[in-house]
Structure formats: structure tokens, C-alpha cells
Image (tube, rainbow, N blue to C red):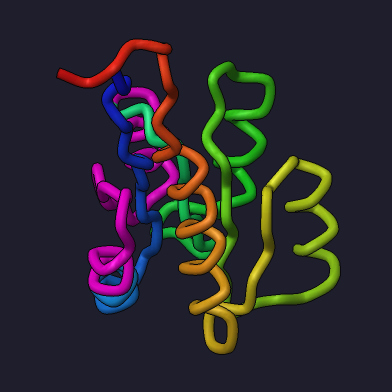
């Protein structure tokens, strides 16, 4: 018998609604992905992480009430901690280094690498969707 496959739970955190909408559209076509929420501020993102337990967070650095780096700082050491994929219009080395230090999985330029973020999430979804065999035959 196969265990139920799980969906990869994704939270989209970006201050700009058209970007959230576009990411949601792109992710809707990725098999095995469920968008569990969207947020536009540090506070809303932290609340969503704690209440929705996403597996992955796409995280903008520029949020309405602060920086995505603050989200990374405040979730550091939490278990389970989602995979953070930083998508930013500010791909400066200093931000990249800080996001890496705070254990972001990826740091991508939103204007040029959004497809790479989708590919990363697709790869994570494929890993999540691998059904485990329990040794029994399906009936």
C-alpha cells in the first residue's frame, strides 16, 4: 500500500500584490504544490508561518513593515523551519550575504530569476511527493 503523498505547502510573502498574484499563478501549474497563504508584512508573514506551517516561504526583502531579513532572524532556530527562497529587487551582495548567514535556501533577483524560484519549488515538491512503499500491495 502506498502512503498518501503530501503537497508542498507554500507561503508567498511580498509587499506588492501583483507579484504575489503572479507567483501564485506560476505555482498553480506546479504539480504537488499547495499555496497555503500570502502575506505582505513581517508581522503577517510570521503569523502565517506559525499558523499555517508552510514547507516553503518565498520571501521578499521589502515588506510593508520591515525587511524579510527580520523574518529570517526571528525564525532562526525554530523547528520545523520552512525553506526560505528570497526573491528581491535588491540583489546586492550585502543582502545576499546576510540572507545566507540567516540560512536562506536561495537568494534570487526577482526581475531575472523568478523562473529559477519556480524550478526550485518544483524540485522540492517532487521530493515531497515521492510515495513511500510500505511493502503491502494496493488493493
Residue 122: image location, x then y, percent: 46, 59
Residue 103: image location, x then y, percent: 74, 41
> Observer-nearest residue: 65 or 122?
122
In the rendered structure, the answer to whether residue 128 lies left or right of residue 68 reads left
Whether residue 136 appears in magenta in the rendering, the answer is no
Is residue 112 visible from the viewing direction of this image?
Answer: yes
Residue 114: image location, x then y, percent: 50, 77
**Residue at x-position 57% and y-position 47%:** 84
In the rendered structure, the answer to whether residue 36 lies left or right of residue 85 reads left
The stretch in magenta equals: 24-51
Q: How many marks?
A: 0
Q: In which quarter of the image is the N terminus?
A: top left
**Location of residue 135 with respect to 43 vertically, above or below:** above
**Residue at x-position 42% and y-position 21%:** 133
> Observer-nearest residue: 44 or 23?
23
Whether residue 47 appears in magenta in the rendering, the answer is yes
Q: In which quarter of the image is the C terminus?
A: top left
**Residue at x-position 58% and y-position 81%:** 113
In the rendered structure, the answer to whether residue 8 lies left or right of residue 68 reads left
Q: In which quarter of the image is residue 134?
A: top left
> Observer-nearest residue: 56 or 124?
124
**Location of residue 115 with respect to 126 vertically, above or below:** below
Is residue 61 visible from the viewing direction of this image?
Answer: no
Residue 62: image location, x then y, percent: 51, 64
Residue furthest bottom as drawn = 112
Q: In which quarter of the image is residue 61?
A: bottom right
**Residue at x-position 36% and y-position 47%:** 10
Amino acid at each position: 500500500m502506498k502512503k498518501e503523498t503530501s503537497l508542498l505547502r507554500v507561503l508567498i510573502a511580498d509587499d506588492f500584490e501583483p507579484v504575489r498574484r503572479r507567483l501564485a499563478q506560476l505555482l498553480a501549474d506546479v504539480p504537488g504544490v499547495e499555496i497555503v497563504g500570502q502575506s505582505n508584512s513581517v508581522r503577517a508573514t510570521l503569523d502565517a508561518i506559525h499558523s499555517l506551517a508552510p514547507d516553503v516561504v518565498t520571501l521578499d526583502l521589502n515588506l510593508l513593515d520591515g525587511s524579510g531579513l527580520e523574518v529570517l532572524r526571528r525564525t532562526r532556530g525554530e523547528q520545523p523551519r520552512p525553506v526560505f527562497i528570497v526573491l528581491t529587487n535588491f540583489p546586492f551582495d550585502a543582502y545576499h550575504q546576510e540572507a545566507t548567514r540567516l540560512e536562506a535556501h536561495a537568494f534570487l533577483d526577482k526581475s531575472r530569476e523568478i523562473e529559477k524560484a519556480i524550478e526550485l519549488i518544483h524540485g522540492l515538491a517532487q521530493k515531497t511527493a515521492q510515495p513511500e512503499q510500505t511493502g503491502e500491495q494496493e488493493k
